[in-house]
Amino acid sequence: MTRLLSILVFSFPLMAQQPLRIATFQADVTPPLGAPLCCDGGVKPAAKIDDKLSARGVIIFGAGKPIVMTAVDWVGIAAQGWEEWRRQIALAAGTDMDHVTVNTLHQHDAPEYDPAANKLLGPVGLGGKLYHEAFAAQAIAKVTAAIRKAVAKPVEITNIGLGKAMVEKVASNRRILGPDGKVKVMRLSSSKIPEAIAAPEGTIDPYIRVISFWNKGKAIAMISYYATHPQSHYGKGAVSADFVGMARAMHENEHPDIVHIHFNGAGGNVAAGKYNDGSPENRPVLAKRLALGMQSAFNETQWLPIKASEVHWDSLPVSLPPAKALLDEAAIKQKMGDTKAAERARLSASHDLNWMNMYRAGRKIPLFMLTLGNARVLYMPGELFVEYQLAAQKMAPDRFVAMAAYGDYSPGYIGTSIAYSQGGYETGPVSRTAPEVENVLMDGMKQLLQMRPGK
C-alpha cells in the first residue's frame, strides 16, 4: 500500500466456469414536462422534448459474479442516489453493488438525482426543486425491469475488438491560461469570444476508444469512451441527449444490429467551446464529427479472442479530501436557508452539506476497473479533469486504457493539484474536493492498473 492510500483494496478474482456471455439493456429515462432540468441558472422545468434520454448498459456473465456497466443520459447521479441505482441494478442482475457502476453522460438538458440533498432542501422551502421524485423512482424501475428481461437471454462472446480514432474539431480545453499561469479566459461549452475561439485546443484527449463484443464474426455490442462536456445549445428547457446522443444514434442507424453504449470520459475541463457558438444548427455538426470518430474507431478494431478467465473486475474505495471552504457547516446551512440568495446557490449548498455529512460519516467512493484481456477501463467519480485520463494511459502504456468519469457525481469538479491555484470556474465553489485529491486518485489508478499487469 502507498502512504497516501491507507485503504482496503477489494479484488474480485473471476474464475472461468462457463463461456463468456453478455446481455445488453436499454430503458427510456426521459423526464416528463415540468420536471426540473439542470441549467446555468440552477434548474429549469422541462418545456419540451427534443429527443429522448436513455439508460443503457452491458452485463457480463461467466466470469464470477455478473458485472454491470450502465450509462445514463442525465446530468448526474450522486451520493446515496448513486448507491440506490447500483443497489437496485445489482438485485435485478443477480450480483452485488461492488460489481455495478453507473455513470452519466452529463447532458445539461437532463435531470439530476441526489435524494439526500433534495431532502435537506425541504425545511428551507425548496423541497422537490432538484428533481421530479415520482419520475426518478419510475426511471429506476424501468431500468431494473429492462435488466431482468436482459439476463434471461445472454449471448456468448468469443472475441473482443479494441479500436481508437481521432475526433476532429469537437473538444477543446475550457481553461485558457494567461502569461501569469492563471486562468485568463473560460472557454465553456459554447463561446463567441474571439480570443477563446482563436486559442489552441489545449490539453485534451483527442481519441475516442471503442470496445466491441463479438460472437465469432458477428458484432453484438460496442462501448465507446470520449472525454468532453456534451453540450451544444442548452439551458432552454428542451430535453435532449445532445450531440453525443445524436452521434450515438447516427452510428446505431448505420449498424442497427449492434447495441451502442457511450460513456463520457474525464471531460471536466473539456468542452466544445472552440468549435461551438451555441446555435441549434451546430448540434448536428458536432454530432457528425463525433459519429465519424465512432465509425473510424470501430473500423480500426483489433479483433482478439477472449476467455472468461481474462475478464476481471476490481474495486478500490477511496476517501476524497473535502474543500476547505466546506468545513464550515454553519455557513453552508446559512447559505441554504438564505431566502435572499440566488436559488442556484441554495441548491448547490444542499449538495455541499450532503457531501460533508457523508465525509464525516467516513464514506468512501469506489474506483472500478474492468479488465478484458489487454484492455483496462477505469470508472471514476465526479467531473474529472482530462489529465487523469491521460495519466492513466501513461501508467499502462502497453495496454488499451479507456476511462469513464461522472460516476458518483457528489464531488463535483475534480481538478489537478495545480489547477486549484490557477483559478477558474471548475476549481472554485463547484469543486467539493481539496488539491490533495490528485494524490489520492493518481495513487488509486496506479494501484488498480498494477493489479492487472497483463500477459
Image (spheres, rainbow, N blue to C red):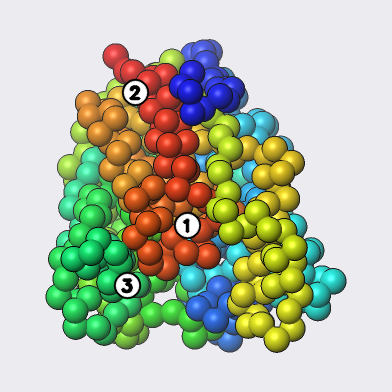
At 43% across and 63% down in the image, what residue appears?
426
Q: Mark 1: few, some, or many residues within 10 Å (few <14, many ≥20)?
A: many
Q: Residue 98, position in %: x, y?
A: 61, 32
**Frontmost residue, 261 versus 22:** 261
Q: Which mark is residue 373?
A: 2
- Quadrant where the C terminus is found in the figure: top left
Residue 323 in view here: yes
Residue 59 in sight in this render: no
Residue at numbered disc 1: 413
User: Residue 8, image x and y in percent?
Assistant: 59, 22
Q: CA distance from mark 3 to mark 2?
A: 40 Å
Instruction: Tell me the residue that label 3 is attached to.
Output: 186
Task: Identify the residue shown where x is 25% and y is 55%.
Answer: 204
Instruction: Assign a secondary structure to mark 3.
Output: strand
Pointers 1 and 2 in contact (CB under 8 A)? Answer: no
Question: What is the three-letter code of the residue carrying label 3?
Answer: Met
